[in-house]
Image (tube, rainbow, N blue to C red):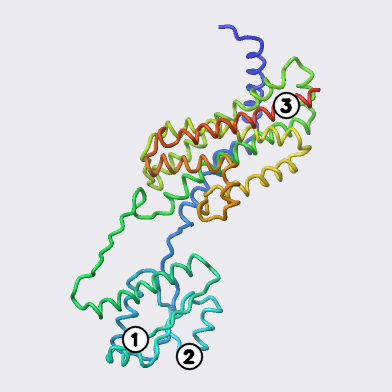
Amino acid sequence: MKLSPSLQRTYSVARKEVVHIRRDPATMFFALAIPIIELFMLGYAIDTNVRHIRTVVYDQCRTQQTAILLRSFETSEDFQIVGEVYSDKELHEAIVSGRAKVGIKIPEDYSRQLERGQSAQILILVDGSESSVAGEALNVGNAIALRESLSRVLQDKPLPVDARPQILFNPDTRSPNFFIPGLMVVMCQMMASMLTTNSIVREKEIGTLEQLFMTPVRAREVMIGKMAPYIGLTFMEFIFIALFMRTVFQVPIAGSFFTLLLITLPFILTMLGVGLFISARASSREAAGQVVMGTMMPSIFLSGYVFPVDSMPWIFRQLSAIFPTTWLIDAARGVILRGAGWKELWLHCLVLWIMATIALTLSTLRFKKQLG
């Protein structure tokens, strides 16, 4: 079957780009190896569940009651007693030096106050330089104190209110289940925009882009031909990371992965359009890389990949909606963790297609301006 002249020109540009990719091992390494390296780093190294907080103890009472209390802290697995100090100065110095994140001081009248039926106080010093550790230490410390108080007040009586929380979708609160679906999106964004930008700017630097514009090939055909190989390469990377996520990190996929791939298509087109627009304005690969990284940082921090969008101030919640990354990360977590389908994610797909249309239109106009 003979292709139309337009399709033949587009195919020629795409074939030329494939040859460039095959002759550039650095591109393939960046596309396939770097995502896997980052996947292992984030999957194994990052854990949002705070455990084994280094704790020092200053026990002035030294009775059976204090031993039971300290055992409660250790058995919670949130605290790890790494040493004992014998003065307020040593307690403070242990936290300042970083040797411990928490210091527990039990006064000498602790047991006597309990035997009299009075309130016995303990002091819990928490290093607030790491907010996640400090928050976990405060919450668990207060919970342990409350449990000890209730056990003494109620004796063997049942609790008046028995709350039984149930965590859905990620009952073990595993960090890879949360991070890796977002990492798939972030890596695809980085690859699609960076590689596309470099492909155009590289031809600018060696002078072949001007030669291409002197041929009968139109701006639209150049764009489609340049994007086609990277669409396939980005999808390959996305599937590759998903395979590692499922087999190596044992993250279950609750919904239809095909649905997620369909929603990913307009996201990739958006990122390719952004990359082409940047490349049309940049004069060197270094300048283009700086612009791409400048667009990456807000996308990572405001998309919900690291910090929940709902916890951000109002203005940043509104800003997060203009980033395609926000929509696809939410869709990826919806499909992979919650089993969401088209009924729940049709808006995500619509918004991403609108963004793709805008990005590709602006890129086309920019290339037509260069041709003029």
Label 3 or label 1, whichever comes before in sequence order: 1
Total marks in image: 3
Q: Is residue 335 left or right of residue 3?
A: left
Q: Amino acid at mark 2?
A: Ser
Q: CA distance from mark 3 to mark 2?
A: 72 Å
Name above or below for residue 204 compared with residue 154.
Answer: above
**Residue lying at 64% horizontally and 31% vertically, measured from the top left:** 358
Q: Amino acid at mark 1?
A: Ser
Q: Is residue 29 left or right of residue 151?
A: right
Binning the other alpha carbons within 10 Å of mark 3 as few (below 14), some (14 to 19) or many (20 upward) gives some
- Residue 365 numbered mark, or none: 3
Q: CA distance from mark 3 to mark 1?
A: 74 Å
Q: Which residue is mark 1?
A: 119
The picture places residue 299, in percent across and down from the top left corner, at: 60, 46
**Residue lying at 55% horizontally and 70% vertically, measured from the top left:** 129
Q: Which residue is mark 2?
A: 87
The picture places residue 29, in percent across and down from the top left corner, at: 59, 40
- Residue 75 numbered mark, or none: none
Label 2 or label 1, whichever comes before in sequence order: 2
